[in-house]
Amino acid sequence: GNSVTQMEGPVTLSEEAFLTINCTYTATGYPSLFWYVQYPGEGLQLLLKATKADDKGSNKGFEATYRKETTSFHLEKGSVQVSDSAVYFCALIPQGHSGGYQKVTFGTGTKLQVIP
Amino acid sequence: GAGVSQSPSNKVTEKGKDVELRCDPISGHTALYWYRQSLGQGLEFLIYFQGNSAPDKSGLPSDRFSAERTGGSVSTLTIQRTQQEDSAVYLCASSPGQGGGIQYFGAGTRLSVL
């Protein structure tokens, strides 16, 4: 079956540090890959996505590149801020015919804490 | 509405009682999902609706859990005879079309079973 594996948290960084949160996946073909972010007390919201190999998703200074050869979609940010403190979820939707239902598989989430 | 709305935001109940959790999806979104998020765990899929039908309810953990959706809009998740292990945050999400792609989440209902 499909699965998503994320690095365990919590991750604690000082403000302006470089962030990497690792994500690897297991799925056949070319799934679509996502990063969602959950701020305290809120639901998840989409941060970025990539739908084919070598695509780079980016948003709010965060980036992730779809690497088929290593089945990875690591999240990076060059300089984190206190406001980036949240839980980050990697997710995938398997490759399938358009218009059909495809269940999203989420990772377990990685908590990021940024200290001033 | 502007976003996915869930109510109540917090629910404390006694073991053995029944609870109902409500979800109002984004207007026009035909797909609706329920997830459970336990402390320190990821998202556990419960059920998927397309319109008023539930083609995938494979994630419901027991027959104490049920859900319905009416008018292709509001959904209610019901937990009967609650147990302490049911304590979690229950998240609802909606999306347009057939359900693939981006999901839009509500803030969740935090359920505490004493």
Image (spheres, coloured by chain):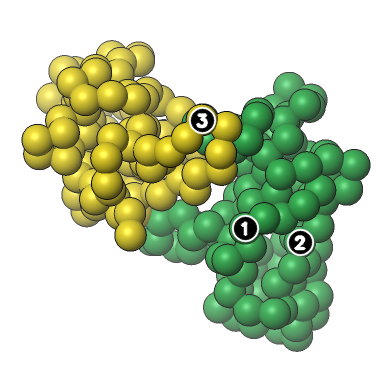
Chain colours: A yellow, B green
Helix, strand, or loop for circle 2? strand
Closest to the camera, between mark 3 and mark 2, is 3
Q: Residue at x 80, y 75 (%)?
A: B18
Left or right: residue B86 versus residue A76 is: right
Q: What chain letter is assigned to the residue under label 3? A: A
Q: Residue at x 78, y 42 (%)?
A: B51
Q: Residue at x 56, y 39 (%)?
A: A100
Closest to the camera, between mark 1 and mark 2, is 1
Q: Position of residue A98 (x, y in %)?
A: 51, 30
Helix, strand, or loop for circle 3? loop
Crowding around mark 2 (Cα neighbors within 10 Å: few <14, some 14 to 19, many 20+) is many
Quadrant of the frame with the N terminus of chain A: bottom left
Q: Position of residue B62 (x, y in %)?
A: 63, 79
In the picture shown, does residue B45 fall above or below B65?
above
The CA distance from mark 1 to mark 3 is 18 Å
Q: Position of residue A42 (x, y in %)?
A: 56, 38
Q: What chain letter is assigned to the residue under label 2? A: B
Crowding around mark 1 (Cα neighbors within 10 Å: few <14, some 14 to 19, many 20+) is some
Q: Position of residue A6 (x, y in %)?
A: 24, 49
Residue most toward the left?
A: A69
- Which amino acid, by three-letter code, is at mark 1? Asp
Crowding around mark 3 (Cα neighbors within 10 Å: few <14, some 14 to 19, many 20+) is few
Tag of residue B56: 1
Closest to the camera, between mark 1 and mark 3, is 3
Q: Which residue is mark 2?
A: B67
Tag of residue A98: 3
